[in-house]
Each structure stands twice: as structure tokens, then as C-alpha cells.
């Protein structure tokens, strides 16, 4: 056997062993959670169904990845399965009627992730047909403006969902993935044109060539904010765009100019839109309206306070005092029953996930598109997690985005798993 072949097989075996070890640890943790829920008698028997479904997804996913992508990153899949399993049992605890639907979405999302990771042409199609895919995603966004609805049934809440055969999905979630892929392709192909040598040999961004991408994202953010009142998606799109543009141009003025634009847009939106004014007001000082408009954020802060260092214990707290605890404020529910240790554990998982994704992008040498795609996907997941966790802690205004892999939401779970499938595929190409 050749030394190179031996090293290849040894590395594949080591990665497989790392994956199964991490999945085993995650499975033990989730099984202990299910047992704790059963003993607390706070959620019926839904935890056992969730546990069985999670085990099936973990075993099938691990075997398929070992079979088709032996040289992938061995940590990405166990981390997202750990987060999704923990989140699924938290939903069982908080809102049992929603747990069955989240379980179905977990099954579908795992299949979609494996399909994207194993299918060799998915990334090439995202690059080659970027304009067609972007047009289709924009059409879905326009359809939401015209035909959108809200599963809650309240007329005063934004209509961000489309209904198809009894299922609701958010086109803005699909747009996150499409936008990152489009920008990675567009900026990757135009990277050389974005930089022009100065007299001293340094490089700076070429302004006119950036106008198209900047106008597109700015217009999309305005549409999200004005017509859909989706502050979270508008902010997320613009932040990720600025970071990717900075990586391409290398010009710090991109970040500075973007920050000024965001502050100016926020100032205008505060005076024009009630939803923005409400979120800023309760962020600055929620206590005078603790029993009315600021009730949700005040209850969230009380949940964090009640959790302390070690938490009240799974099934022993009162996180249901926080409205929509299974979705927008699931981070507060976790903090109450798991305490600071649980919060640190969750943040650590997202930190490791982000660092692994950024490492894949920085080490990828085959094309600028793949480098930017890995970095963009990692940045998107990290920015979304920071926004929702910061909002629940009153560090930033509430944005209404979901906590990736953890909160209830089929569209978010599906798109997040597809992003991980792309990162796994990209990691298998890194040497």
C-alpha cells in the first residue's frame, strides 16, 4: 500500500471515529434530557418520539456521510444534530403540539442536507444559474407581499409566510441562502475588478463596480422593512452583505459606510414605522410598560435572572410566562432551566460551528466562489444567532429572527441544514 493511500485511509478512519464519538455524546445528552422531561411529567410522552426520530436522523446521516464524503469536516454534523436535538426537546417542553411538526421538519431537513452534501453538482448549479435562482427567490418574496399570511392569525402581525398544502414557509429564509450564494458567485468572479492598484502598489475598492450589488441588497432590505415589516431579515441581509463585500474589496470604508447607512436607515425607520419604534422604545427602557408593550422582553429578562448559574432544572422552571417561548424567546427559556452553564454551552456550539465554517473558507483554494460561500454561510448563521440572543438579553433591539437549529420553525431549520450541507461539501474539497 502506498504511503499516501495509507494516510488517506487513516485520516478517513480518524474522522469517522471523531464523528461517532461526538454523536454518541450528543445522543447521551439528549437521552438524559428526554428522561428528565419524562420524570418531570411536563410534556406527556412526546420526548420519546422526538428521541427516536433524532437517533434515526443521526445514524442515517452519519453513515451516509462516512460512505460518500470520508474527507469531510467531522465536527459540523454532530454539532448541528446536537443543537437540533436539544432544541426539539426544548420545544417538546414548551409547546408539545408544535413538536411533532418540528420533528417532521428535522427529518426533511436532514435529508435535504445529505442531498446537498452528497450531490456533486449542487454548488456548481448555484453558481451557474445564480440569476435564475435569485429571480425565483425574489418572485417568492413578491408573492409573500401579495398573498402572504401569518399562522398566528393576528391581523397586526407581519404576513411573512406562504401556505402550501397546509404547511407554512417563509420565503425570506430561502432568500438568505440564495443571497449568500449569489453574492459569493458575483463577488468571487468580480474580485479582481473590485480592486485597482494605487500609485504605491496597494489596492483599493473600485466604487462603480460595486454599485450593482449594493443597489440590489439595499433595495431588498428596504422591501423587507417597508412592505413586510421584517426588521430581522432586512438587518441580517445587509450585515452579511457588508461583511462579504469587505472581504472581497479589502477596504475598511465599506464597513464604515455601511454602519453609517444602517444608522441613517434606522433613524428614518424609527420615525416612519411603528414596529421599529416599538422595538427601539422597549429596548431603551422597557420597565414603564412592563405589563403591556414590553411584557415579552421583561419576562425574558426575568427568565434569565431566575436561571442563575445552574438553572432551575429541566421541566422545573416557568418559561411559559414568556410569550412565544418556543420560537422568538427560546433562548430565554433555555437560560431559565439550564442557567448560565447552558447559555455558555449553547454559545460555545455556535462559536465552534462558525469557526469551523470560516476555517473551511480560509483554507479553500480552488475558487473565490467557494471561499466566499463558506465564509458567507458561516457569517449568516453566526449573525442570526447573535441577533436573536442579543435581542432576548436586551443587548440590541428585538429583530424577530429564529435561533438556528434550536427555535421552532420549519423553514429556518430546513435552510440552516442546507447551509450545513454546503459547508460539509466544501470541507470535503479542502486538503
Image (spheres, rainbow, N blue to C red):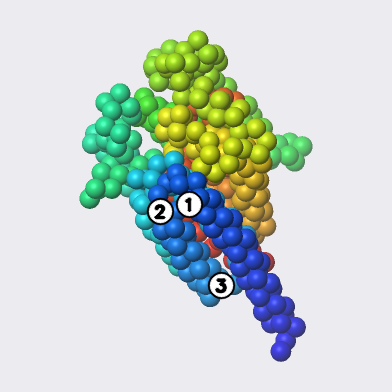
Residue 409 spot, x, y in % from top left: 40, 44
Quarter assignment of residue 274: top left
Q: Earlier in the sequence, mark 2 or mark 1?
A: 1
Question: Which numbered mark, 3 or 1, is in the foreground of this view?
Answer: 1
Q: Residue furthest top?
A: 288
According to the image, label 1 marks what residue? Answer: 38
Q: Are marks 2 and 1 in contact (CB under 8 Å)?
A: yes
Residue 105 spot, x, y in % from top left: 38, 53
Q: Earlier in the sequence, mark 2 or mark 3?
A: 2
According to the image, label 2 marks what residue? Answer: 45
Gap between marks 2 and 3, in whole Å? Answer: 33 Å
Q: With respect to residue 119, does 393 lie above or below?
A: above
**In the rendered image, is residue 133 in sight?**
no
Q: With respect to residue 258, does 80 lie above or below?
A: below
Instruction: Name the element at disc 1.
Output: helix
Relative to the observer, which residue lies in front, 78 or 176? 78
Residue 378 spot, x, y in % from top left: 57, 48
According to the image, label 3 marks what residue? Answer: 66
Quarter assignment of residue 370: bottom right
- In this rendering, would 223 be left or right of 281? left
Quick one: quadrant of the N terminus?
bottom right
Relative to the observer, which residue lies in front, 426 or 367? 426
Q: With respect to residue 285, does 210 lie above or below?
A: below
Amino acid at each position: 500500500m502506498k504511503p499516501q493511500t495509507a494516510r488517506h485511509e487513516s485520516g478517513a478512519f480518524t474522522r469517522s471515529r471523531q464523528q461517532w464519538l461526538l454523536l454518541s455524546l450528543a445522543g447521551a445528552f439528549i437521552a438524559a434530557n428526554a428522561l428528565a422531561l419524562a420524570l418531570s411529567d411536563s410534556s406527556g410522552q412526546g420526548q420519546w418520539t422526538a428521541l427516536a426520530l433524532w437517533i434515526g436522523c443521526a445514524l442515517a446521516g452519519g453513515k451516509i456521510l462516512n460512505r460518500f464524503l470520508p474527507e469531510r469536516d467531522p465536527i459540523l454534523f454532530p454539532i448541528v444534530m446536537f443543537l437540533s436535538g436539544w432544541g426539539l426537546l426544548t420545544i417538546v417542553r414548551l409547546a408539545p403540539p408544535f413538536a411533532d411538526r418540528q420533528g417532521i421538519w428535522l427529518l426533511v431537513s436532514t435529508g435535504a442536507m445529505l442531498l446537498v452534501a452528497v450531490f456533486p453538482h449542487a454548488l456548481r448549479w448555484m453558481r451557474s444559474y445564480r440569476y435564475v435562482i435569485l429571480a425565483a427567490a425574489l418572485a417568492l418574496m413578491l408573492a409573500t407581499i401579495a398573498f402572504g399570511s401569518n399562522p398566528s392569525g393576528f391581523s397586526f402581525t407581519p404576513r411573512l409566510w406562504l401556505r402550501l398544502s397546509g404547511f407554512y414557509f417563509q420565503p425570506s429564509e430561502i432568500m438568505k441562502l440564495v443571497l449568500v450564494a449569489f453574492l459569493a458567485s458575483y463577488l468571487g468572479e468580480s474580485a479582481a475588478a473590485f480592486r485597482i492598484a494605487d500609485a504605491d502598489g496597494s489596492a483599493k475598492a473600485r466604487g462603480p463596480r460595486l454599485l450593482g450589488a449594493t443597489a440590489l441588497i439595499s433595495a431588498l432590505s428596504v422591501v423587507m422593512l417597508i412592505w413586510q415589516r421584517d426588521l430581522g431579515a432586512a438587518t441580517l441581509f445587509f450585515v452579511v452583505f457588508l461583511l462579504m463585500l469587505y472581504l472581497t474589496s479589502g477596504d475598511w470604508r465599506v464597513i464604515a459606510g455601511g454602519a453609517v447607512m444602517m444608522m441613517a436607515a434606522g433613524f428614518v425607520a424609527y420615525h416612519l414605522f411603528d414596529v421599529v419604534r416599538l422595538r427601539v422604545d422597549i429596548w431603551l427602557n422597557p420597565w414603564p410598560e412592563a405589563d403591556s408593550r414590553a411584557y415579552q422582553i421583561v419576562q425574558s429578562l426575568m427568565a434569565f435572572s431566575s436561571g442563575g448559574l445552574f438553572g432551575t432544572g429541566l421541566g422545573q422552571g416557568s418559561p411559559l410566562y414568556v410569550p412565544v417561548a418556543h420560537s422568538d424567546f427560546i433562548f430565554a427559556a433555555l437560560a431559565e432551566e439550564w442557567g448560565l452553564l447552558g447559555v455558555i454551552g449553547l454559545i460555545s456550539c455556535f462559536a465552534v460551528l462558525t469557526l469551523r465554517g470560516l476555517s473551511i473558507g480560509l483554507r479553500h483554494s480552488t475558487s473565490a466562489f467557494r471561499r466566499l460561500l463558506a465564509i458567507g454561510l458561516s457569517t449568516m448563521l453566526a449573525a442570526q444567532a447573535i441577533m436573536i440572543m442579543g435581542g432576548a438579553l436586551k443587548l440590541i433591539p428585538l429583530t424577530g429572527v429564529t435561533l438556528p437549529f434550536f427555535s421552532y420553525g420549519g423553514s429556518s431549520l430546513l435552510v440552516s441544514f442546507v447551509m450545513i450541507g454546503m459547508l460539509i461539501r466544501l470541507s470535503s474539497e479542502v486538503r
